[in-house]
Structure formats: C-alpha cells, structure tokens
Image: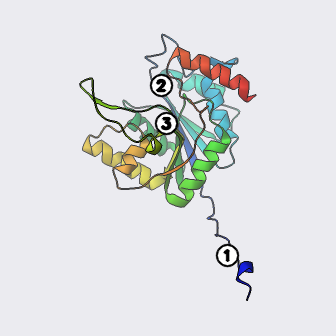
Amino acid sequence: MDITKVTKPARKLLKLKACGAVIVAAGTASRMGGIDKVMAQLQGEPMIVRTVRTFQNCDAISEIVIVTREDLILPITALVREMPKVKAVVCGGKSRQESVARGLNALSDKVKLAAVHDGARPLVTWQVIDRAVRAANTYGAAAPAVPVKDTIKVVEGRVVKNTPDRATLFAVQTPQVFDFDLLRGALKKAAADGAAVTDDCSAVERMGMSVKIVEGDERNIKVTTPMDLKIAEMLLEEMQ
C-alpha cells in the first residue's frame, strides 16, 4: 500500500446548537461626558441599532434579548421593531452580572448556547460572532481576543512587581459564548459567593472551565469615552 495516499478521515462537524444573544446596554455611561452611549449616533443612527443589526444578520444567532435601562426600554423597542430575532427588551440589574442573568432568563427554552455581547461594541462583525459561536458549540465556552501589543506591567503601590510575557497576553472581546446552563450556573455561583467578575469568562473560569480563544478583530472596540466614539466613526467609514 502506498502510504502517501492514505488520508485521515474528515473530522465530523457537530450540529450547530441554537444560540441566543444577550446584548447588554444597561450602563450609565459615566465616562462619556454627558453622552448617552447606547443612543449615541454613529453615521446617523443610534449605536445600539448597529450592534443589534449585526446579530440579526448573523445566521449563527437564532434570537436576541437586549438588556438596557428602564428609561430606554420603549425607545430601543421602537428602534428594533423590524428585527424579528429580537424577542425582548428587558430592564437591567444593579450589576452587569445581574443584567446578564436577566437577559438569559428572557431567552426561550430552545436556546442551548448563549452569546453575551457589550452593546457598546457596535463594530463587531458577523464573522467574529460566527467564530465564537462555533467554538463554543464544540468546547462549551469561547471568546474572541486579540494579542496585546503593549508591554504590560503588574503594579502595586506604583511599583512594578513583574512583567508578564507579552506573547501569552490577549485582550478579550465580546461576544463571549457559552453553553447556556454552564453560564447560568456560573453566574449564580459568582453571585452566591459575592465574587465580582469582570466578564462572563471569569465567572465560567471560576467553575474550572477552560475557555477557547478565537480570532477577534482590532476594530471590535468598546466605546467608553467620547474619543472612542470618534475612533468608531473613523473605523466605520473604513469598513464600508
């Protein structure tokens, strides 16, 4: 037998489970200098609309729940009324963890995967969403990330304690995607323990679960300051 002609059997692809997106837009935008970033205009339309539309147009997403402030429920509901995947617009909680939990509770029983995304990341692409969903479908937990460019210092009392190897450091983005029951259980455990986690991956990591990293996008920035908004405008122009 000519062993050069022997090929390995193709890896069987798992059927893609139904994935619901929880888009969190319940913050107070304290660093935006009086600008309400959820409704901030990007090329003539509210930022939240651009964020939600990308999930609406992504085949890997089956339904969407938006979590926002009470005063924005009606305005946002009106803005997304022609996006059929949006199943609910609900009021957020006192913390991001609570807001995500409320969003999860509003998803249907059909959902087996949950993608949690910052409403203030309006330049996310469907490709990034798709990669994260498909990785979570296989591994149970996944998130997009980009390599860190700057040298990072661990500092205590304004004194450098150590310098981590930059090659091992990544800036994690959203959407972060998980097995639905895993994420809900992890958030409940974090709340019960009084643990303040900075993102959903952290909650899952506390449960001993590994998170698969997929390729992110440097344009998938989080709009936190007025300068970020200007940068988003410029990036949007380049993407069109």
Look at label 2 and name its amino acid. Answer: Arg
Give the SS element for disc 2: loop
Residue 182 position in % (x across, y down): 42, 54
Q: CA distance from mark 2 to mark 1?
A: 51 Å
Q: Are marks 2 and 3 in contact (CB under 8 Å)?
A: no
Which residue is denoted by mark 2 in the rendering? 69
The numbered disc on residue 148 is 3
Residue 72 position in % (x across, y down): 53, 22
User: Is residue 22 at least partly visible in the picture?
Assistant: yes
Q: CA distance from mark 2 to mark 3?
A: 32 Å
Q: Are marks 2 and 1 in contact (CB under 8 Å)?
A: no
Disc nearer the start of the sequence (2/1)? 1
Q: What residue is shown at x 39% (from left), y 38% (from top)?
A: 97
Q: What residue is shown at x 37% (from left), y 50% (from top)?
A: 205
- Discs 3/1, front: 3
User: Which quarter of the image is occupied by the C terminus?
Assistant: top right
Which residue is more in the foreground, 105 or 24?
A: 24
Disc nearer the start of the sequence (3/1)? 1
Q: CA distance from mark 3 to mark 1?
A: 37 Å
Which residue is more in the foreground, 144 or 66?
A: 144
Q: Residues within 10 Å of mark 3 (few under 14, many from 20)?
A: some
Residue 132 position in % (x across, y down): 57, 48
Give the SS element for disc 3: loop
Look at label 1 and name its amino acid. Answer: Pro
Look at label 3 and name its amino acid. Answer: Val
User: Is residue 110 at least partly visible in the picture?
Assistant: no
Which residue is more in the foreground, 57 or 240?
A: 240
Q: Is residue 43 left or right of residue 156?
A: right
Q: Residues within 10 Å of mark 2 (few under 14, many from 20)?
A: many
The numbered disc on residue 9 is 1
Residue 140 position in % (x across, y down): 49, 57
The residue at the far top in this view is 34
